[in-house]
Image (tube, rainbow, N blue to C red):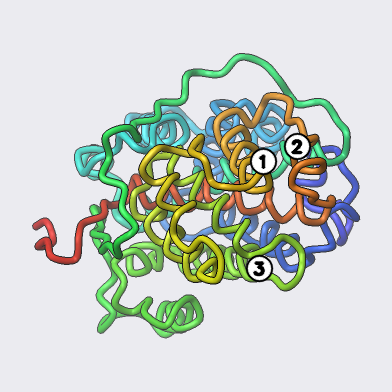
Amino acid sequence: MSATSDVIDAVAGTPAALRTYRDKAHAHTQGAHAALLTGTGGLPRAERAGLAAYAAELDGARALAAHYRDLSPAPAPSARFAALRRHAGLLVLAPSTAGPKDIAALTEAGWEAPEVVAASQLVAFVTYQARLAAGLRALGGLPAEGGELPAYDVASEGRPFTIDALEWDAWVETVDVDRATPEQLAVLEESLPTAKTSPYYLALVHDVTSLRERSRLYNAIMYAPRGLDRRDREIAALAVSRVNGCVYCASVHARRFTQLNKADEGAAPARAILDEGPDADTGTARRRAVADFAVRLTREPNQPLDLTALRRDAGLDDTEILDLVHVVAVFAWANRLMLTLGEPRTISEEPHA
């Protein structure tokens, strides 16, 4: 593999030049892959590769699954690893149905919080890779991988979606910031001004290198200059989060869209998606095309993706579509971590014990 290509280029079959327009996203995607496959702790490489291959198979990403199978011999069967495989199935196919009992099941199987976080990061990252590769194949004019998949269990209907700010409580043990290592403190300071008080970041910082790469990749996708309009990025993030049932992420990105859109219709498009789902009337053909593509790539990454509406109705060029693919893919990752490692609550609620 050359210095200018990476795993995604290989499994998507597309030239690296299609992606190096966003060189930071390109570099940190491969950086996250390396961090998640070589992490230290109680999750050996064979189990990491086996878990990633299983997740890719569930997502219909056959070339990606083959890549992971080639990295290491299959791990020896064990009750401990079987528990991780069950958790991988939950993350890929039914993340919005997760609860604290699912983390408890991993603990009972002998996995500790750093291992649970590492495994969850890895599986969620594979769902990012699968959608990024699928979007790239569509941009490169290549066929989708196709095939039948297990049903994706979306439990978003009836959930309390809101534009109001929320808190988030972890189901896994978090790092005590007063006892954090210098490396953990450094990556928290890099990630977000409030990361040292955020249960989400204090959970993810169990796996320091992966959190660093994930934070840099997220910033490269959501805040990169030029390319896709920031409002389109936020409406895509909102549509994906609404489909996946991630109340917390939907709230955050509804507010960010509204802040960026205050000179126009303000919160109306975001509130429509929160209240009615991603098929709601968002006011413009451009937003309709962006939301429709986000939903399709989220739900069926192994099926053909039609870019006609993005090009004709939204007026997007290939670099803007690349930005959109990145957004949809990274929220497959972000939503799954939020949904399976903890839960949102209103700011007035007391944290769960």
Q: Residue at x 40, y 63 (%)?
A: 204
Relative to 83, say whether 193 is above or below.
below
Query: Residue 224, located in which quarter of the rendered image?
Result: bottom right
Graded by Cα atoms within 10 Å as few (under 14), some (14 to 19) or many (20 or more), the crowding at tag 1 reads many
Is 152 situated left or right of 248 in this image? Answer: right
Q: Secondary structure under badge 1? A: helix
Side (left or right) of 292 relative to 15: left
Nearer to us in this view, 111 or 303: 303
Of residues 164 and 12, the one drawn nearer to the viewer in this rendering = 164
Q: Is residue 42 visible?
A: no
What residue did someone put label 3 on? 220
Q: Amino acid at mark 2?
A: Ala
Rendered location of residue 320, percent (x, y) = 77, 55
Look at 43% across and 39% down and name the residue there: 244
Q: Are marks 2 and 1 in contact (CB under 8 Å)?
A: yes
The disc, 3 or 2, on the residue closer to the chain's N-terminal end is 3
The residue where tag 2 is placed is: 309
Side of 348 relative to 89 (left or right): left
